Every structure is written in C-alpha cells, then in structure tokens.
Amino acid sequence: MLIFAFVIAIVVMILAISKLKIHPFLSIMMISLLLGLAAGIPLVNVTVKYGAVVQGIANVIGAGFSGTFTSIGIVIIPGALIGTVLEAGGCRFFARGQASRGQASRGLS
C-alpha cells in the first residue's frame, strides 16, 4: 500500500511541477508532507510506552534535508563562492563572450 502511495506521490509531484507550474521546492515539500501523513508519521513528536519518542513529520523532513545539504554543501558552497568572486572581478562578461564566440565558430548557436 505504501509503495502505491509513493508512486502516486511521484506522479502528482511531476504534474505539479510541469503542468501546474508550482515551484519545485514547494512541490517537494507539499508531497513529502502528504506522503509522510499517508505513511502514518505523526504531525508532532509523540511519546509512546516506556518513554520512547516517535519523531514528528517536521523532524523527519528536516533530517532528510540536512543530510542532503550536508553531502552536497561541500560542492555548492565553493562553487557559489567562486562564481561570486568571478562576477565581482568582471569575468562573467568575458566568459560569456568567449563561450558565444566558440559556439558560433562551430555552428552551435
């Protein structure tokens, strides 16, 4: 049953992004919230027998995002830093001009 809900969630997410033009971040957040509720994850942290705590949906989604950003942050942060430095130095216009000239000479533009 959960696999079926997952497949439906993926289809709805693709339709929301492509047909309804909802921003991908908002679409992913909305679908992950709905899929989490369908999977039986509570909205807030719940303490069950013997003091065990079942994590709420906000903690589960937050843990997933933090794991993703931790692994790709090493690549994205230096790339953004290098791009900012290059833009401040005026290299953006030079690189754009070089790229467009190279494509025109090869018949790509």
Image: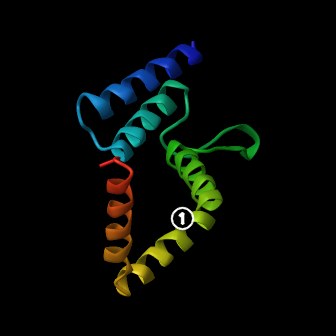
Q: Residue furthest right?
A: 50
Q: Nearer the viewer, residue 79 or 40?
A: 79
In the rendered image, residue 5, in percent from the top left (x then y), is placed at 50, 18
Q: Is residue 86 left or right of residue 79?
A: left
Q: Nearer the viewer, residue 24 or 62?
A: 24
Q: Nearer the viewer, residue 75 or 94?
A: 94
Q: Residue at x 47, y 71 (%)?
A: 80
Give the answer, above or below, for where 83 lies relative to 72.
below
Q: Residue at x 57, y 18 (%)?
A: 2
Task: Please name the amino acid that badge 1 sits on.
Answer: Ile
Q: Residue at x 58, y 57 (%)?
A: 66
In the rendered image, residue 89, in percent from the top left (x then y), is placed at 38, 87
Q: Is residue 37 left or right of residue 21?
A: right
Q: Nearer the viewer, residue 63 or 20?
A: 20
Q: Is residue 78 left or right of residue 48?
A: left
Residue topped by disc 1: 76
Dividing the picture into quarters, in which one does residue 18 lie? top left
Q: Which element is circle 1 on? A: helix
Q: Is residue 86 left or right of residue 49?
A: left
